[in-house]
């Protein structure tokens, strides 16, 4: 019988993993540039953390979470997102007491959501996320957005737009919640069962209902931005002014509410119109979450962050540039069993000196081995036939300039180094 990977999961094979590494390196470089440090938290957490942090009326928690009981009967969830774990670790490790008030961290890794898989949507997917905790300032909101924009610019992604909105502070959200209830009260009979429950518990979630998305009352629903308190409005205005000053393009999208419950004030998404992702796909999103740390038992601490879906970044990137794969330094080509023993010595010596090498392990003839050297894009082919073994020499061919030379064993390293540094004189 055969096995297949669980639906919604993907194997990243050699040939693709290089793209991932390149993306990860680029993201790490940008993080360093913004003085954001890496933080790693567990892939599973107590389910209760996500119920609390993300909210049990959100689809992510109520419908999409992988939750199970461990052997002691504890409810454990595979993390559907990264912010909750970072917030938990921030509190547990008392990072709020660190001398530097603003803590800026990033993470990369797998997240899990039981969703219907499609292009750019998986059940195990990867996020690159950033959280900036400890300071409530529109400057920090904008630093986050700027960093997100830097990522899409560094990747050269076309057709992306920064959408922003504000959900306001507690006062604004209380006023807005009442306005939403007034609006939807008369339509309650026409909405789905989930929305009826959301109406009581968290009417904001009605707005991202997938079942009722086309209901006319959705279009005419009140906008968060019309219910902002004065201080929330000031915060949002300052965010907009800072973005203007930095000449960052954005649109104010009054329908943007985000799907997780912890947000307050600024929310934003980076939306791509790349056809490979489906029009209007979100490559990344985030916002401010001033109540989250307190909600999970920490001292009142503001925070703001964002996360990108790494698969979506790679999909959008796919034909932007084709990988010019780095080749090997040396491909060692032994002909015959005796030559293999010597090849093993040579390859070990070359690797110990920092060269990337491979050798033939399947005892092919010269032609087959040259094909491999070609496939690996090897700079040098090092050929060892019976004659060479007997004479304690190898035949080194530079596959770039096609020069070929017989080199004594003890001179292999010097020959290669000399050739690479541009000198071609005979040893
Ligand atoms: P989110 O909008 O739920 O936010 O997810 C962020 C990004 O993860 C999405 O924009 C999308 O690119 C990617 N993503 C989500 N679900 C999937 C999936 N099933 N398959 C592939 N990619 C997916 C958060 O997770 C927040 N924690 C972001 C944040 C950080 N807010 C503040 N700090």
Image (cartoon, rainbow, N blue to C red):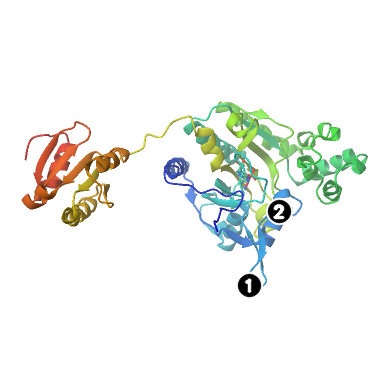
- Is residue 121 shown left or right of residue 30? right
Give the spatial CA distance, label 2 vs label 1: 22 Å
* In the rendered image, the vertical position of residue 142 relative to residue 108, given as above or below: above
- Is residue 393 shown left or right of residue 254? left
Q: Nearer the viewer, residue 310 or 205?
A: 310
**Secondary structure at numbered mark 2:** helix
Tag 2 residue: 61
Q: Residues within 10 Å of mark 2 (few under 14, many from 20)?
A: many
Q: Nearer the viewer, residue 198 or 20?
A: 20
Q: Is the residue at mark 1 in contact range of ligand 1, meaning its CB lies under 8 Å from it?
A: no
Image quadrant of ligand 1 equals: top right
Quadrant where the image shows the N terminus? bottom right
- Is residue 244 shown left or right of residue 326? right
Q: Nearer the viewer, residue 370 or 22?
A: 370
Callout 2 touching callout 1 (CB < 8 Å): no
Circle on res. 418:
none
Quadrant where the image shows the C terminus? top left
Tag 1 residue: 71
Residue situated furthest bottom in the rendering: 72
Q: Residue 412: image x %, image y %?
A: 13, 46
Q: Residues within 10 Å of mark 1 (few under 14, many from 20)?
A: few
* In the rendered image, the vertical position of residue 195 relative to residue 56, given as above or below: above
* In the rendered image, the vertical position of residue 181 relative to residue 73, given as above or below: above
- Between disc 2 and disc 1, the foreground one is 1
Q: Residue 345: image x %, image y %?
A: 18, 56
Q: Residue 261: image x %, image y %?
A: 72, 48
């Amino acid at each position: 019988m055969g096995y297949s990977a669980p639906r919604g999961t993907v194997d990243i094979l050699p040939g693709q993993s290089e793209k991932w590494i390149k993306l990860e390196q680029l993201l790490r470089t940008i993080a360093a540039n913004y003085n954001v440090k890496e933080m790693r938290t567990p892939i599973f957490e107590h389910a209760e953390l996500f119920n609390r942090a993300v909210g049990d009326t959100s689809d992510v928690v109520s419908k999409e979470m992988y939750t199970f009981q461990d052997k002691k009967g504890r409810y454990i969830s595979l993390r559907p997102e990264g912010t909750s774990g970072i917030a938990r670790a921030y509190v547990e490790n008392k990072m709020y007491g660190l001398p530097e008030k603003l803590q800026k961290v990033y993470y990369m890794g797998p997240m899990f959501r039981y969703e219907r898989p499609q292009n750019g949507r998986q059940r195990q997917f990867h996020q690159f996320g950033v959280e900036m905790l400890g300071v409530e300032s529109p400057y920090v909101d904008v630093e986050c957005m700027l960093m997100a924009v830097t990522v899409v610019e560094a990747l050269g992604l076309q057709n992306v737009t920064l959408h922003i909105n504000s959900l306001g502070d507690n006062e604004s959200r209380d006023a807005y919640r009442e306005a939403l209830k007034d609006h939807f009260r008369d339509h309650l009979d026409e909405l789905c069962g989930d929305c009826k429950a959301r109406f009581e518990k968290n009417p904001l979630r009605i707005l991202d209902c997938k079942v009722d998305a086309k209901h006319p009352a959705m279009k005419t629903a009140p906008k968060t931005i019309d219910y902002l308190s004065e201080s929330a409005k000031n915060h949002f205005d300052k965010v907009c002014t800072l973005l203007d000053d930095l000449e960052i393009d954005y649109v104010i999208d009054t329908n943007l509410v985000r799907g997780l419950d912890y947000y307050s004030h600024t929310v934003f998404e980076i939306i791509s119109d790349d056809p490979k992702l489906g029009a209007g796909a979100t490559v990344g999103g985030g916002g401010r979450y001033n109540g989250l740390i307190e909600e999970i038992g920490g001292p009142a601490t503001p925070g703001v962050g964002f996360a990108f879906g790494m698969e979506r970044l790679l999909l959008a990137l796919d034909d932007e540039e084709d990988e010019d794969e780095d080749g090997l330094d040396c491909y060692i080509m032994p002909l015959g069993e005796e030559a293999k023993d010597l090849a093993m010595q040579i390859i070990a010596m070359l690797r110990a000196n920092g060269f990337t090498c491979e050798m033939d392990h399947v005892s092919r003839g010269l032609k087959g081995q040259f094909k491999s050297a070609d496939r690996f894009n090897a700079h040098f082919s090092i050929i060892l036939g019976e004659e060479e073994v007997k004479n304690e020499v190898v035949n080194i061919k530079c596959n770039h300039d096609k020069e070929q030379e017989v080199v004594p064993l003890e001179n292999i390293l010097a020959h290669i180094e000399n050739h690479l540094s541009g000198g071609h004189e005979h040893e």
